[in-house]
Amino acid sequence: MPLSLHRTAFSSSALASLAFVGLVVPAHAARIAEWNFDDGTASDSVGGYDLTLVGGGPVITAGTALFDGDEASPSFLETAGYGAHPDWSIAMRIRSEAPFDQGGYQGIFSNNSASTASYSWQVESFDGRYQFRTTGGVFDIGVPTGGWDTIVVRKTGGNDGDVWLNGVQVVASFGSNPGGLQNFRLGTNRNSNSFYAFEADWFRVYDSFEDPATIPEPGTALLLGLGLLGLSAPRRR
């Protein structure tokens, strides 16, 4: 085959691969809110749920928020949320600060402002392990890796859901209604009296049962696209 035709065929194949990738990606649930801290603030990049600093708040730089976990000087972020909803997904990318075992009920993300409130829930650290706690039960998520961890909690059909850690389903079913999205509270538990030391890359809230496979690590989709485009570039011989 002439070199020019070989290049054309190879380029077409690579572009077809790109098209195929676009076709097989599952449809996304709509994002209600996202806090990625890229602009150095706690503003919502997709909706109207800008967070308010309570106490000193975390230290926010361009791209991350550092929660110090200091219970002597409480600080966290919060805003009124979306409200009751039959389906939702919460995703977060966090990195735990050492030591991982910082006690019990150490809040990472919580809904409502009291553990006795109807359908309140929280993602927390307890004795060095991530947990999902609701009024209906407590579910173990796993141990921090020491690097960036992605936690996804999903509610479906109003009365069930599951939990994922770093792309692996760790809770197949929590078999109860965890509640809604009445409040978005980052860096604290439901009672506002226990705080985990961690760094956050982003938090995302979806209005439906989002497929964890469609929540890539930052830059993954871009790198995939660039790699495939690289295959289509002509080579010099």
Image (cartoon, rainbow, N blue to C red):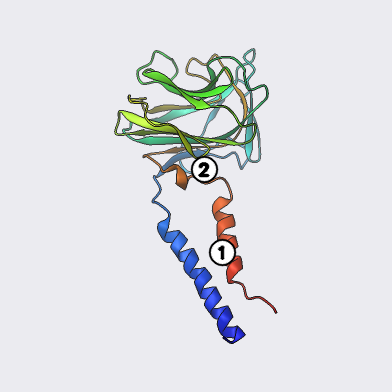
At which x and y percent is residue 9? 52, 78
Q: Would residue 148 be visible to someone looking at this image?
A: yes
**First in sequence: mark 2 vs mark 1:** 2
User: Residue tagged by mark 1?
Assistant: 228
Amino acid at dot 2: Ser
Quickly name the residue at label 2. Answer: 45
Identify the residue at the far right of this view.
237
Name the residue located 66 percent from the left edge and 75 percent from the top edge: 235
Q: Judging from the image, what secondary structure is the residue with disc 1 in?
A: helix
Q: Could you say where residue 221 lies in the image, as x and y percent from the top left?
A: 54, 53
Please identify the quadrant where the N terminus is shown.
Answer: bottom right
Work out whether 207 lies above or below 16: above
Crowd tier of the residue under label 1, counting other residues whose Cα lies within 10 Å: few below 14, some 14–19, many 20 or above: some
Amino acid, disc 1: Leu
Left or right: 117 in relation to 96? left
Q: Is residue 111 something that shows in the picture?
A: no
**Residue depicted at 59% across the width and 84% down the height:** 4
**Is 125 left or right of 61, judged from the image as shown?**
left
Q: Which is more toward the observer, 140 or 230?
A: 140
